[in-house]
Image (spheres, rainbow, N blue to C red):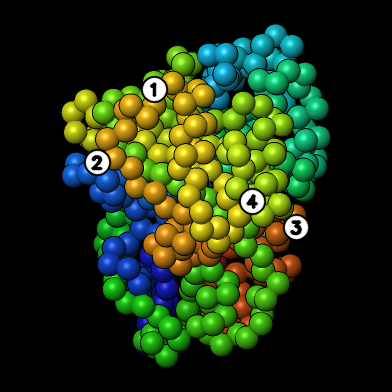
Amino acid sequence: MLDAVVVGAGPNGLTAAVELARRGFSVAVFEARDTVGGGSRTEELTLPGFRHDPCAAAHPLGINSPAFRAMPLERYGLEWLHAQLPMAHPFTDGSAAVLARSVAETAASFGPRDAGAYRRLVAPFLSKWDTLAHDFMSLPLTALPRDPVTLARFGLAGLPPSTWLMRRFRDERAKALFAGLVAHVIAPLEGVATGAVGLVFALAAHARGWPVARGGSQSIADALTAYLKDLGGTVHTDYEVKRLDDLPPARAYVFDTSPKALARIAGFGRYYEGYRYGAGVFKIDYALDGPVPWTAEEARVAGTVQVGASRAEIGSALRAASREGRAPDAPFLITVQPSVVDPSRAPEGKQVFWAYGHVPNGWTGDLTDAIERQLERFAPGFRDRVLARATAGPPVLAARNANYVGGDIACGAASGLQLMLRPRPSLSPYGTPHPAVFLCSSATPPGPGVHGMSGHNAAKAVWRRLRES
């Protein structure tokens, strides 16, 4: 009998498996698709030689993850590559605010009226970032806070809505950039704890950047898999699990799935009935004949580029997708251009690039024209660079990854209390009605992102049970 079986070979499932194997437990992973990866895959979606990331591409939480940093993943081929700027936020006048590794450079890009306010906002936390990241990403109750005073101070700044935090700024540049940071988790700007979301992304950039993985995000999953195998674990692909009886006998079962999929497989009935899924995304992967012709010079050297003319425009786009049930006319876009720093991703002189905008959950329309109109506002001539495109709305995203219910790449709405209390209010969010069954997906704290911390935290709950039994 195995000690643990993990269902789903995404970053969280693989991290949970590694954490258990490192502690001497026998582990097997079962994945429905023919390759590991989940939200960290790399595929040729457009033309031969163009290697795209179907979901996550830039990894501020990955390089800052306490779980990943404790593993020798570089020995297994994971290499982080940093663009000159982690992120740029261009404006229609050709200027840009930036999120640089340097706090001073970032503050200067906001202008003199907001530079000091930004420095005062991040200064209390940056020197204690590693401890804060550990405490923030290990909540709740998987570990006692190492620095409860700093964590409490962070909570005071971050628990209110981001709109409150943005009152510190006087000009549009800082407000728009910060609104864009919050939008990475597809959360309305007025939501509880959205200030914390923006702060985490900003601090992560200053601490270690927003890198891409050399060769594509697949290398993260591949490194975790190789490490797991060296620890004695096994991985089985092309193995779809429809009920617990499909799995071999084990002392514990750990699911990197959506909560409702787990309930269906394990026979938990309506246990997760109250779990909400959020807005979806419409994503386009591009093969380009050259770099994106951004008007703002800063955007040309940034790994990630946020596209939204103002805080009001960004907020309107989020409300349309999340609350009004319609696709926004001017979508807020998150874009990543890996070829800025990794020429191996495309043939010589060519580039890969992706962009996505937010749409209602399950939306079946086509946002291509709206996305490209928005890109043309900030990069005139963009369409002339397009060699091929691969579009994926909510139905396609859900078909590729069963955790993306209705196209929700966060595996559940990251808004309201569900941003913090996932998948339901509980002191043990990784546990389920069955004492031997656990949940470790992005539907559990600390939530979405390729960081493995949901798997790491769930593994703690699993090994405590295994040692008790």
The residue located at (69%, 15%) in the rendering is: 115
Instruction: For marks 3 and 4, give the one nearer the viewer.
Output: 4
| Residues at marks 1 and 3 touching, judged by CB atoms closer than 8 Å | no
Which element type, helix, strand or loop, lies under badge 2? loop
Compute the Cα span from label 4 to label 1.
28 Å
Local packing at callout 3 (Cα closer than 10 Å; few below 14, some 14-19, many 20+) is some
Residue type, label 1? Gly
- Looking at the image, residue 442 sits to the left or right of residue 71; the answer is right
Compute the Cα span from label 3 to label 4.
24 Å
First in sequence: mark 3 or mark 4? 4
The residue located at (48%, 50%) in the rendering is: 366
Any mark on residue 326, and which?
Answer: 4
Q: Is residue 108 visible?
A: yes
Which element type, helix, strand or loop, lies under badge 1? loop
Any mark on residue 50, and which?
Answer: 2
Please, is residue 200 above or below residue 298 in the view? below
Q: Where is mark 3, residue-wise?
A: 417
Compute the Cα span from label 1 to label 2.
21 Å
Which element type, helix, strand or loop, lies under badge 3? helix
First in sequence: mark 4 or mark 1? 4
Compute the Cα span from label 2 to label 4.
32 Å
Instruction: For marks 1 and 2, give the one nearer the viewer.
Output: 1
Q: Position of residue 404 (x, y in %)?
A: 50, 61
Residue type, label 3? Leu
Q: Position of residue 374 (x, y in %)?
A: 52, 31
Q: Position of residue 84 (x, y in %)?
A: 41, 21
The residue located at (72%, 41%) in the rendering is: 189
- Looking at the image, residue 327 sits to the left or right of residue 252; the answer is right
Local packing at callout 2 (Cα closer than 10 Å; few below 14, some 14-19, many 20+) is many
